[in-house]
Amino acid sequence: KKSSGSDLRSPICCILGHVDTGKTKLLDCIRRTNVQEGEAGGITQQIGATYFPTENIRERTRELKADATLKVPGLLVIDTPGHESFTNLRSRGSSLCDIAVLVVDIMHGLEPQTIESLNLLKGRNTEFIVALNKVDRLYGWKSCPNAPIIKAMKQQTNDVKNEFNMRLTQIITEFKEQGLNTALYYKNKEMGETFNIVPTSAISGEGIPDLLLLLVQWAQKTMEDKLTYVDEVQCTVLEVKVIEGLGTTIDVVLVNGLLHEGDQIVVCGMQGPIMTTIRALLTPHPMKELRVKGTYVHHKELKAAQGVKISAQGLEHAIAGTALYVVGPNDDAEHIKAAVMQD
Ligand code: GTP
Ligand code: MG
Ligand code: NA
């Protein structure tokens, strides 16, 4: 099907890492929300999605003076659980993304689900950036809220810098043992072969501007073809959920194409294909988490990439992790119904 030229869609970025490394907290810091504190036991148990419009990314990266280089409409970020029992959700999240952030706790280094995540990324050849999180826990760290990391580092004593360098060196060695070259992003002379490390704090925000800018720039630079918008719908079901007032809904990630209110869709169901009509096409507000109950924005039409809540009849038995198809005017519905059950 036709593509719309140089029209770029928002990159999809998946956050991966061992449990409690601060994946959700990093997103809370960028969103200025408190999703993590509302989680049962402080553990993420679902895939989430948040849309960051470029104007917000511009605001958060202002000190790095890179305004003109931001070409994509925004960034769609997928949060995943780090608990060992959710391998399937990490796999689903990583299969949807264009780029990833692998979060490592600077006090712990590489842990079992860090390595599992790393193997998922290697398996798909996915570009990623390492967020070396919790730098504020270095003994004597002087907080520089939301500062670029180079500026924050300059404020630190030699003792803090020494502890940082010691832990960084150890973690670079651990990556090497996994067959990967990594380096601090501002010292990386072989971008592309050596993976970038960005030190961050999800509590005081140091390094967040760097992480955001690097993500968007790296995505734009290395995957222009992949990010060129195409009309053909590519869409995956994340969750099936009952919402008061809406009935059973599905949360989806629209990777490419357009969805409209009234579109006829087919999804995979436990008792066979489900053909239904989109009754409402909803998103959370920008910078809000799709998986958290809140107010929704109604849309007549939505363009990829977006995290979307779809309300429609008959979704009770829909299966998460499978593809959603749109039945076009010239499409054979029976053919699509057969295709949907292949997933
Ligand atoms: P799962 O989704 O359950 O795998 O965890 P997560 O990786 O999303 O980590 P989460 O955001 O739940 O944070 C875990 C704990 O670490 C919480 O108590 C956070 O407050 C704390 N934390 C996260 N990031 C930071 C940080 O940068 N500095 C400090 N000091 N604590 C942090
Ligand atoms: Mg989490
Ligand atoms: Na957690």
Image (cartoon, rainbow, N blue to C red):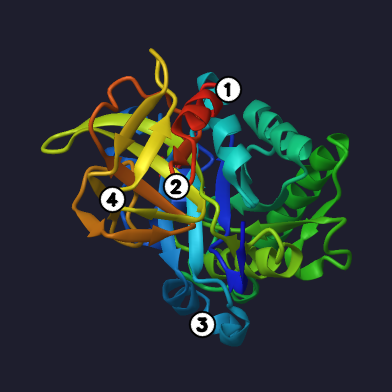
Q: Is residue 310 left or right of 142 when viewed as pictured?
A: left
Q: Which residue is identified by label 3?
A: 62
Q: Is residue 4 left or right of 322 when viewed as pictured?
A: right
| Residue 98 at least partly seen | yes
Task: State the SS at label 3.
Answer: helix
Q: Which residue is identified by label 4?
A: 281
Determine whether label 4 and label 3 are within 8 Å by CB: no
| Disc 4 CB within 8 Å of nearest ligand 2 atom | no
Mark 1–mark 4 Cα distance, whole angstroms, equals 26 Å
Query: In which quadrant is the C terminus drawn?
Result: top right
Task: State the SS at label 1.
Answer: loop
Determine whether label 2 and label 3 are within 8 Å by CB: no
Numbered label tally: 4
Circle 2 or circle 1, nearest the eye: 2
Residue at the limit of the structure toward the top, as seen here = 271
- In the image shown, does 318 or 330 lie closer to the viewer? 330
Mark 2–mark 3 Cα distance, whole angstroms, equals 43 Å
Give whichever of discs 4 and 3 has the lower sequence position.
Answer: 3
- In the image shown, does 163 or 270 lie closer to the viewer? 270
Q: Which residue is identified by label 2?
A: 328
Corner quadrant of residue 244: top left
